Amino acid sequence: MKFSYNWLRELVDGLSAPAGELARRITLKTAECEGVEETGGDWIIEVDNKSLTHRPDLWGHYGMAREVAAIFGKKLVDPVKRRDIPGAPAIGVRIEDYSLCPRYSALALDHVTVRPSPGWMAERLKSVGLNAINNIVDVTNYVMAELAQPMHAFDAAKLQGGIVVRRAGSGEEIAALNGESYKLDASNLVIADGSGAVAIAGVIGGAGSSICESTTRIVLESANFNASSVRKTSSRLKLRTDASMRFEKAQDPMNTIRGLERALELLEQVCPGIRLAGGVADAYRPAPPPAPIALPVEWLSRKLGRAMGPSEVRAILESLEFQVTETGAGVFSVVAPSWRATKDVCTKDDLVEEIGRMVGYDSIVPAAPLAPVRAPHANPQREFQHRVREMAAAQGFTEVKNYSFVSEEMARAFSLDPSAHVEVANPIAADQNLLRRSLLPGIWKNIRDNARYFDSFRLFEIGRAIALEGETPHFAAAIFSKGDGAAGLYELKRLAECLLPGASARPAESSESYEHPHRVANIVHGETALGRLFEFHPRMVELGRAAVLDMDLALMEKMQRPRPRYEPLRRFPASAFDLSVVAPGRALIADVEAELSRHAGRDLLSIAFLGDFALEDGRRSLSFRLTAGAWDRTLTSEEVNAMRSSIIEGLRQSGFELRL
């Protein structure tokens, strides 16, 4: 937002501070200043719009001048000369839904001559980033830049009947002033006449009723529209204008008549001979007056962090045109002005901000708040997920955070029905209209994006899979490599075992379309399925191999073991021996380990897989190291041999051969 220094000086009586000083004081009190630039004998102060988001009044010079007057202790000059506009309205105005349009004011004028604006107006508009078009349109833009009240001018000869503010019909179209045509629906508010829509309310006018060189009669619109409605329409049409940006901030309904009065004065200057064709048409349903806010000065001082006197507080608020009444000793009743009562100032905390910025936050001595120290409530889920993060990071994985949105195309890529997803009513982008049912689409995108720059990487995400019936926390991890990549599945299997001791991988009976058909397994704990371990199908990842682990965190948390307790070191030595078991080629190592453990007895301490060897007949020789020991003594060689013999005999009865 650009502000003209000369314009501000006209609105603040006696203002003599240089432009640089003015910009510095504005920066400290009101906004973030991006710079000051000299242009044609004027200084242009550019303010970051984001800092004015909650201040609809500061989208015009008069509102900023009010701030400047309060900061420098000067008198504000009202540019609007109040005047009676007698006579019956020359045009009818009707509003169908006052919640979408609280007020619509219009004024008809004739004896209009359309021509270029005088140099002073064209230069002033240009200095604040607005293009000069003609004297009629330039006046509406001038009022918008001065009073923050967007206006629009219709060619009265092109209107058929009175004006109706209504919802658009389904499929209704309008050709706009920017040369584009827009198809509307019932969520859009339009200004219409007897023939149809002539403007998109709060956004842009229609080309069919625009001002041209042959225009001799005009209708000036000065209206107020619902901020949310304008924002939704602007977003849906992908069209943001100077008017829509101001209406989105919730403008003051009391400002519409002031806008007409100011526009009439300017039109009489730039269009000599112009005449009123009737009185003001004003459709208006007054909103309830803003509720008074009780402001105890003692509470204010404590909240602000510095002592404030009642007289100082009152002087500051009244300089900003708040109504202040003392209702008790050190207690004020404060009523916000109409331009601050629209989604801006409504609580006493808002008033603390007003006082704080005017006295300067640099005048407050920093001090730590005095508050009782209490231990936070235990959050088992957060603690568990924190341990999962630590475990994954310790094994070289980098955490990623993806949006919770996916496109229909991405859902289908993972065999997911788009209709089974929760659909976003107002998506942030066209390709993010569904809430994700799985973390895998985001992980897949991470792999594709990073594969262009890295030969290998590891990443993981903790997030929620969102279904129609509820949300479930999930853990997803991936290992990518442009080389062989065969170890990725084993690394992720080990990660699953670390995250939940006792978890194991079991071959899956079938695979999804995005999974490698021969490299997919279920992660189970006992009889409970926890997730999936697989490699992406080669068509999904073309630059290498990507192994993925996807687990249900809620089930993992339920099955986690109690935290290990301290156990003393073993006092007696253990004994170990190796066994090589001949098993079928497709036998699972976990099944063989289970058989070894079943026949070993209670003195077995651990089983370690050493490796396998392929035999000529297609079978495999699996080698294990078994460690035996007792807590209260050293096992004798006879006891160790008895364990070994028991294991061998049990394996033979189960159909296994041993290489002794």
Image (spheres, rainbow, N blue to C red):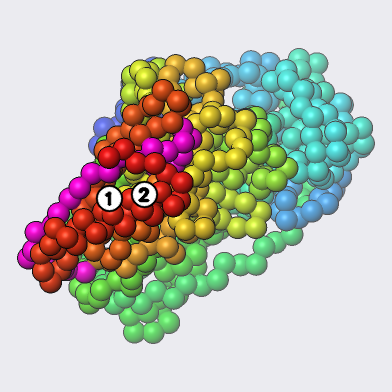
Q: Is residue 589 magenta?
A: yes
Q: Name the residue furthest bottom.
A: 328
Q: Residue at x 17, y 50 (%)?
A: 576
Q: Residue at x 33, y 50 (%)?
A: 648
The N terminus lies in quadrant: top left
Asked if the residue under mark 2 is in contact with the one under mark 1, i.e. CB atoms within 8 Å, the reply is yes
Three-letter amino acid code at the position of disc 1: Ile
Please provide percent x and percent y for residue 248.
Answer: 59, 43
Question: Marks 1 and 2, Cα distance to the nearest angstrom?
Answer: 7 Å
Give the mark nearest the N terminus, 1 or 2: 2
Q: Residue at x 76, y 44 (%)?
A: 187
Question: 81 or 500, which is in the foreground?
Answer: 500
* Residue under label 2: 593
* Placement of 130 over or under 574, stated as above or below: above
Q: Quadrant of residue 435?
A: top right
Please provide percent x and percent y for residue 228.
Answer: 63, 48
Q: Which residues are magenta?
A: 565-590
* Placement of 202 over or under 535, stated as above or below: below
Q: Is residue 612 magenta?
A: no
Left or right, 145 with respect to 557, comes to right
* Placement of 495 over or under 519, stated as above or below: below
* Residue under label 1: 607
